């Protein structure tokens, strides 16, 4: 039985935010804005690599870094999904004021993170050449791609534990401390890139090493924060274990998200293989677009994450009406922001792409990609916000099924057939607005008429 609690909704000295009382817009902004700034700096990890590699080492090196990202994302996506599930579990218990179960869920999450980090290191380093050959990576960039990939995955524990520990902090509403750590780490990453690549003339392996070192720093700082957090959600290393009951809850919430992320990542690898067939200049142009999209879409991602935490905490507290009001506010905000962002990207596309690579052919490819998709960001944002709502409500299976069916199976099938009929890179680009439109319609129908909230809280 969930109980109401008398905790206030303000930001405490510990950084935690209870979202069960107070103004919904204020609380979501209070949570999402530090999260946005933090994620902007996190994007600098990969973007700094791309800018510095592209300008100091050339388009071929940029293509090598860009081509590895689909595989890297594939490897980490499943574990990220697990931690989304873990965060929902922690948020529910935290919202209900159940300190015992909050503690159990936090220590089980940390245990899962250590196991996942070990698995990711082993698999990532061992299967690098196989995965890159399967993707059809061009021979002229294979050496750099293998090197970047292996150095990156040698530091897998830092990446996994960072996502694990930040997930715990965010589930209790603390997005402020991760921001501080990421600002510091991103500055460290840029300095290391400039020194190792710009100053010492080292190759793409140095770019990966700079990213790993910076991520390790932010992971350590998150761990230190949890060691000093209030008793309600403090991490005690001696208590890290796998509680069977919590593991089951995390898997029920996290495995659907993990499978969804992994299969979408596989689909992206297939799409990247189609892009690779058009040569390294097209690869570089599409890689530059991916970085632009990663930056510009961050406000939507952060609001979706805020929605998941908000829904989870308020369901834990038994506040059904508040859940519905928060879901509507979050979804409308996401769509409005996305369209403003899309228009801006459409207008500034040449300058944005040129920031990553000054080659006119690469710029032309990147601008075309931007202008074929940017005005449809509103559709993509609605799908993300709907998925965030449903995950927070414990319905992670629904977005998994929708995105697997539409963004994976249908998208890959469409591209495979359409490219044979019209063998142009623009054919690949058109798959994105089409599949975003279909998923938006499905989510609208389900949120309107589906039983996504429990009848009794």
Image (spheres, rainbow, N blue to C red):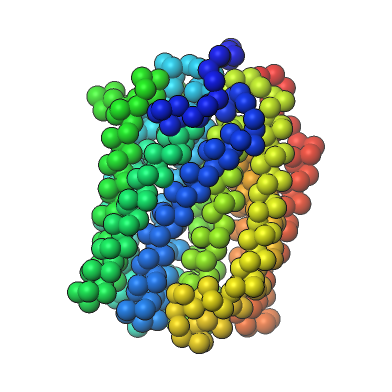
**Image position of 286 with respect to 394: above or below:** below
Can you give x and y, in whole percent of width and height, for residue 157 in the image?
29, 47
Which residue is farthest left?
200
Q: Is residue 20 left or right of residue 249?
A: right
Which residue is located at x 40 percent, y 60 percent? 44
Q: Which part of the image, by quadrant, shows the N terminus?
A: top right
Which residue is located at x 37 percent, y 22 percent? 230
Viewer-nearest residue: 425 or 177: 177
**Image position of 277 with respect to 147: above or below:** below
Q: Is residue 164 visible?
A: yes
Q: How many dots with numbers?
A: 0
Q: Which part of the image, by quadrant, shows the C terminus?
A: top right
Viewer-nearest residue: 28 or 321: 28
Q: Is residue 124 left or right of residue 255?
A: left
**Image position of 14 with respect to 155: above or below:** above
Can you give x and y, in whole percent of width and height, for residue 333 in the image?
68, 47
Q: Is residue 259 visible?
A: no
Q: Quadrant of residue 435?
A: bottom right
Which residue is located at x 56 percent, y 14 percent? 5
Q: Is residue 386 left or right of residue 220?
A: right
Viewer-nearest residue: 181 or 61: 181
Can you give x and y, in whole percent of width and height, for residue 343 in the image?
67, 66
Which residue is located at x 41 percent, y 65 percent? 47
Which residue is farthest bottom?
360
Can you give x and y, in whole percent of width and height, for residue 180 in the image?
37, 44
Q: Quadrant of residue 115?
A: top left
């Amino acid at each position: 039985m969930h109980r109401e609690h008398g905790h206030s909704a303000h930001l405490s000295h510990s950084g935690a935010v209870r979202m069960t009382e107070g103004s919904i817009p204020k609380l979501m902004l209070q949570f999402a804005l530090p999260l946005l700034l933090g994620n902007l700096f996190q994007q600098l990890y990969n973007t700094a690599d791309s800018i510095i590699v592209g300008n100091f080492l050339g388009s071929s090196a940029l293509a090598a870094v860009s081509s590895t990202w689909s595989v890297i994302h594939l490897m980490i996506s499943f574990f990220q999904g697990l931690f989304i599930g873990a965060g929902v579990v922690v948020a529910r218990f935290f919202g209900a004021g159940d300190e015992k179960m909050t503690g159990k869920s936090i220590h089980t999450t940390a245990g899962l993170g250590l196991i996942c980090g070990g698995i990711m290191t082993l698999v990532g380093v061992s299967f690098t050449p196989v995965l890159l050959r399967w993707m059809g990576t061009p021979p002229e960039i294979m050496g750099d791609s293998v090197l970047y990939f292996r150095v990156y995955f040698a530091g897998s524990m830092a990446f996994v534990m960072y996502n694990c520990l930040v997930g715990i902090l965010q589930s209790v509403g603390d997005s402020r401390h991760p921001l501080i750590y990421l600002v510091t780490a991103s500055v460290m990453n840029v300095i290391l890139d400039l020194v190792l690549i710009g100053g010492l003339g080292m190759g793409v392996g140095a770019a990966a090493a700079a990213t790993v070192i910076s991520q390790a720093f932010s992971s350590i700082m998150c761990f230190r924060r949890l060691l000093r957090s209030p008793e309600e959600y403090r991490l005690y290393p001696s208590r890290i274990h796998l509680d069977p009951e919590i593991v089951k809850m995390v898997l029920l919430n996290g495995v659907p998200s993990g499978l969804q992320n992994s299969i979408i990542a596989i689909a992206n690898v297939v799409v990247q293989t189609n892009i690779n067939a058009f040569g390294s200049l097209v690869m570089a142009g599409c890689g530059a677009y991916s970085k632009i999209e990663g930056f510009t879409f961050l406000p939507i991602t952060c609001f979706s994450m805020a929605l998941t935490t908000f829904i989870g905490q308020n369901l834990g507290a038994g506040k059904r009406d508040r859940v519905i009001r928060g879901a509507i506010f979050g979804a409308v905000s996401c769509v409005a922001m996305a369209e403003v962002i899309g228009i801006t990207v459409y207008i500034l596309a040449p300058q944005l792409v040129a920031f990553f690579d000054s080659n006119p052919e690469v710029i032309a490819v990147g601008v075309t990609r931007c202008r074929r998709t940017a005005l449809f960001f509103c559709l993509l944002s609605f799908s993300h916000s709907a998925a965030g709502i449903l995950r927070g409500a414990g319905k992670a299976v629904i977005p998994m099924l929708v995105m697997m069916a539409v963004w994976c199976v249908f998208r890959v099938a469409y591209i495979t057939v359409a490219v044979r009929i019209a063998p142009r890179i623009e054919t690949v680009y058109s798959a994105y607005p089409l599949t975003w439109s279909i998923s938006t319609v499905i989510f609208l129908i389900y949120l309107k008429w589906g039983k996504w909230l429990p009848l009794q809280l």
